[in-house]
Amino acid sequence: MKLVDSDDFRLLSVDHVARLLSHDELGVRVENDVVGILHQWIKHDETSRRHHVENLATKVIRLPLIDYSNETSSLNILSNLDYEDSSSSSSSCQRRVGCEGVLLVAGGGRICNEDTDKYEFVSRAQTYDAYDDTWTSFPSLEVRRCEPRIVTSFGVAYALGGRTIDFDGEDDFKSTCLAVVERYDPERRRWIDDVASMSTPRSRDEIVCCANRIYGMSLAHDEMMCEAFDPTTGTWTPVASPGGGERRLENGYILSSLAGKIFAIGREMSSGKFGHMTYDPSENRWLDFRPENHVKSIIDSSSIFYGSIGDRLYIFSNGRLQVFFDDRSERSSVDDDWSHSFWLKRTYGLAADSDCKRLFLLGRSLTDGELVLLVVSQDDDGRVKEWKESDWLSSNFRNAVECAVVDRSLVLNVGV
């Protein structure tokens, strides 16, 4: 973006501009920046370059990624485009490297209030930008809580459920599960609770987003409460549950969205077998419980973190990153070729960036105990390609965090 203001850029030929602005690794933050760059190049010699607008715009600008709510004068160059004709000729809808999502971390930790000499819970939020390896402050949740489920739907970030913690002393505390839902409003730059609450309080492992709908599913209780939130209507509606109480899963089960379906992975109460139940949103029904031997090593852990990319579910437990495939995959089990060890002293969260095929692991380093972030990149087959370690600068989170990948434009609107 700094080079755009130089004479070297303004004097580029039309062919050079076309090659440059259509590149997947163009160093921009949002696709609207490409419109602004093209606008500057045209304005430098508008008389001779005006007739290139339509051809260049349809070739280099990824029109479905444009945010038209962010009105700028440069968007005027798109006003006369024939979108039906341009949709087939424009570049792919894949985000550029510079437009990758960023990691949002929300939660809190215990501090001692110097005035009252009592322990209390504080709430914090931060974002991490892997593009330039920087942390930025972000508005904290209005409702103080730990381990909320953070999800995004239609580009909107939601914080659901979690627990409040009240401290009676250094080690004595009571925890209350919540049903509240907040969404982040980029115009007001704060979280607001104008979203309907869930019908029942839920922990983060009972909430998952699938195909832009948010599901709350409590499967460890006698009455299995399952519901779905439609962001377009702002309402929660009941959905099918797996069946009777004999189908309950023991505490410790996890929910994940995988290839357009929802997987509940755990131990069946009646049989004691490990496996998964699958919910198909398109048919509003649960498929049979399917035992898998390798699931036991995943579930028998005090801390389980997971994220999905395409048809793969990545599960991190006991210092080991493993891959669980859906039924349509050629492989359906985990072996040494599809796992990798990261020796963290303690893990606090995992998030998946589907567009960039990478994972974020938050935790404490095994060597020095410092807070660290591991950014894990994969190849096309889902294997670990490379990983790098970044300092996690905040000490306000402890172990009470939740993280998710959110749209970069949402973070840029914070203005901090």
Image (cartoon, rainbow, N blue to C red):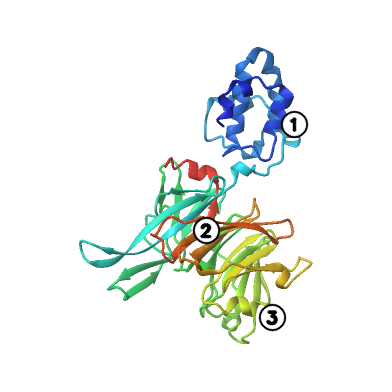
Which residue does the image show at 59% across and 42% down from the upper left?
99
Which residue does the image show at 71% across and 41% down from the upper left?
92
**Of 348 and 270, the residue lying toward us:** 348
Percent position of residue 41, x then y: 62, 22
Mark nearest the camera among 3 and 2 is: 2
Mark nearest the camera among 2 and 1 is: 2
> How far is the residue under mark 1 from the one under mark 3?
52 Å
**Of 382 and 39, the residue lying toward us:** 382
Q: Amino acid at mark 2?
A: Leu
**Residue to which mark 2 is pinned:** 373
Percent position of residue 79, x then y: 62, 26
Percent position of residue 247, x then y: 60, 81
**Of 342 and 238, the residue lying toward us:** 342
Crowd around label 1: few <14 · some 14–19 · many ≥20 (10 Å): few
Tell me if residue 20 can be seen: yes
- What is the secondary structure assignment of the residue under circle 2? strand
Q: Residue furthest left?
A: 115
Q: Quadrant of the N terminus?
A: top right
**Residue to which mark 1 is pinned:** 85
**Residue to which mark 3 is pinned:** 293
